[in-house]
Image: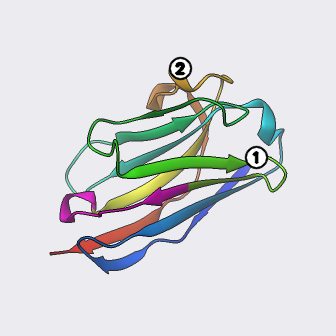
């Protein structure tokens, strides 16, 4: 049974930084691409970032490019998302997910087979 658990969410002011973690248990973490998605109240789930199996390739949504950084540590079965220069519009529940593929380029909401329960990030103005 593959389980994903996000942590690191919280309440902070605009301009601040936060690091989210996603710890994966079960399965083979190092064989699959991983992704971060977010969903704000009343909005559809949005792609945030993806990373390939080795960490050598990444991809970002347009709204977070240059501010967020995705990384992974396969020795710890953990993925991270460092979020800088946070804006109120970054407020959302952030989900991590495991892809069915090893390639970051193929990551989308429809290509993920396991999801975490999410962690809430609230950015005040």
Q: Residue furthest left?
A: 125
Q: In what element is the residue under mark 2?
A: helix
Confirm or deny contact between disc 1 and disc 2 (CB under 8 A): no
Camera-side mark, 1 or 2 = 2
Q: Say if 112 sits above or below 76 in the image.
A: above
Residue beneath the point at 53% across and 71% down: 8
How many numbered marks does the figure carry? Answer: 2
Residue beneath the point at 29% across and 64% down: 86
The local crowd at label 2, few if under 14, some if 14 to 19, many if 20 or more residues have their Cα within 10 Å, is some
Among numbered discs 1 and 2, the one appearing first in the sequence? 1
Residue 87 in the figure: left or right of residue 9: left
Residue beneath the point at 59% across and 29% down: 57
Q: Position of residue 121 (x, y in %)?
A: 37, 68
Q: Position of residue 56 (x, y in %)?
A: 66, 31
Judging depth in this view, the residue of 1 and 59 nearest the camera is: 59
* Residue 101 falls inside the magenta stretch: no
Q: Residue furthest front?
A: 66
* Residue 88 falls inside the magenta stretch: yes
The local crowd at label 1, few if under 14, some if 14 to 19, many if 20 or more residues have their Cα within 10 Å, is some
Q: Position of residue 37 (x, y in %)?
A: 43, 45
Residue 72 in the figure: left or right of residue 28: left
Name the residue beneath numbered marker 1. 2
Q: In what element is the residue under mark 1?
A: loop
- Which residues lie in the magenta part? 81-90
Q: CA distance from mark 1 to mark 2?
A: 20 Å
Name the residue beneath numbered marker 2. 106
Residue 76 sits in quarter: bottom right
Residue beneath the point at 83% across and 48% down: 26
Q: Say if 6 sits above or below 65 in the image.
A: below
């Amino acid at each position: 049974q593959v389980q994903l658990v996000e942590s690191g969410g919280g309440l902070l002011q605009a301009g601040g930084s936060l690091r989210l973690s996603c710890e994966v248990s079960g399965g083979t973490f190092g064989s699959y691409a991983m992704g971060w998605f977010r969903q704000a109240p009343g909005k559809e789930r949005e792609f945030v970032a993806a990373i390939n199996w080795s960490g050598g390739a990444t991809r970002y949504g347009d709204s977070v490019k240059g501010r967020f950084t995705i990384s992974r540590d396969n020795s710890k079965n953990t993925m991270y998302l460092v979020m800088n220069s946070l804006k109120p519009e970054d407020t959302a529940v952030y989900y991590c997910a495991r892809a069915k593929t090893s390639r970051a380029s193929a990551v989308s909401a429809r290509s993920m087979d396991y999801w975490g329960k999410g962690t809430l990030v609230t950015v005040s103005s």
